Image (spheres, helix red, strand yellow):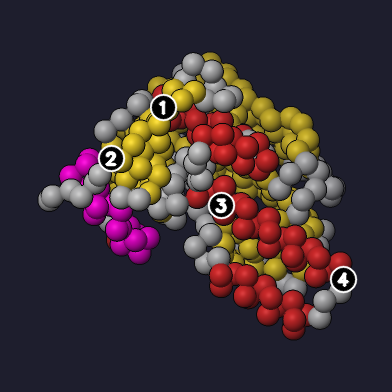
Amino acid sequence: MTSNIQFVYILVFEFKWMPNISMAILMIQGWQMRMFATFDLFKAEVEQTTGFTYDELDAYERSIGFNSFGKIADQRMIELVKEVDKMETTATSPIMAQARITQSLTANTTYLQIIADENGENSCETKYFRSPYRYVMNLERMFKVDTLYFKVFEEGHASCGISHYNDLRNLTDAQFSLLEETDTTFNVFKHASSGRGNYGLYLAKTEISSDGKQKVTVELYYHQHSVIYWEYIMDLDAEFWVRTWGKHKWLGIWWDSHRTYTNNITLWVMVNGTLQSGSDVGSNGGYKRHKKLLSVHNLYSYWPVIYINKSAGYGKIPAVTCYMNFN
């Protein structure tokens, strides 16, 4: 297949928060794209960008001349939430408020969505909000690592070499959902449905603290980089992450809530007979918190068993300790 890719310019500069690590931005067919020379540099940038507050992320992207899909989506969400808060405060009539909300959502269907949450209730979320790559992917949801081009989808991500770049660029979420991980055109990585899934995101546990009007949700998951398994044993490289966010309910929809909440989470993992741990303890005053707890390598294990102890109460994340024993 003939490629129409044109490299117009390359900018090379230093990370503002990561000294001595260089990166590049490509302009491909009119679109900016982040490029990383190695997977280690890519993983380090993913960790950094997901840890930023919105203001830090905005300043960072301005400094490098890039707009990520995730930053733009967060920006549209913040604007909508501010409008919702204003209408709620001024007691705008429900009919008028719903019309304005529908208008805003219609204008931002690329970035925002109303989905059914874990209890079947409607929740306003950004598109691809669980992907750890949302702040490195461009507005076409793509980026480049080494010689591979990647694209993010709701159910995972895919990659390919330059010869199939246009095919990947044009691939839709619906088309991706039909692909098998044995596909010969693309490297297909779908979110894991169990601890023994292939590469991708595995949501291990969700806990919610709610009084019916406001709630805080914490998700514990691991992002798998490689896994080889036989019978009931697997060799796993993964990173364990925690994602926390607050919401409040108005007009039957859960909206992001700009409030302070506290994480008190400790993760314990038995890695080849050695106990390792990672924690996230502290307060966050923004909409969301997304933090890597621990990296594990060469993990020979059985099915993961996850125990979460939580205390009662609302206003803070309950004191949550996550014990994960892989033996």
Q: Earlier in the sequence, mark 2 or mark 1?
A: 2
Residue 198 in picture, x, y percent from top left: 36, 41
Amino acid on which the number 2 mark rests in the picture: Phe
- The alpha-carbon separation of the residues under discs 3 and 4 comes to 27 Å
- The alpha-carbon separation of the residues under discs 1 and 3 comes to 23 Å
- Residue identified by numbered label 3: 72
- Per the rendered image, the range of residues in magenta is 161-177
Residue 204 in picture, x, y percent from top left: 54, 43
Question: Depth-wise, is mark 4 or mark 2 nearer the camera?
Answer: 2
- The alpha-carbon separation of the residues under discs 3 and 2 comes to 24 Å
- Residue identified by numbered label 4: 90
Residue 7, which numbered label?
Answer: 2
Q: Is residue 326 above or below residue 101?
A: above
Q: Earlier in the sequence, mark 1 or mark 3?
A: 1
Of 131 and 210, the residue lying toward us: 131
Q: Earlier in the sequence, mark 1 or mark 4?
A: 1
| Residue 250 makes an appearance in the image | yes
Does residue 10 appear left or right of residue 93 in this picture?
Answer: left
Amino acid on which the number 1 mark rests in the picture: Val
| Residue drawn at 54 percent across, 18 percent down | 19
Instruction: Name the quadrant containing residue 279.
Output: top right
Of 194 and 278, the residue lying toward us: 278
Residue 172 magenta: yes
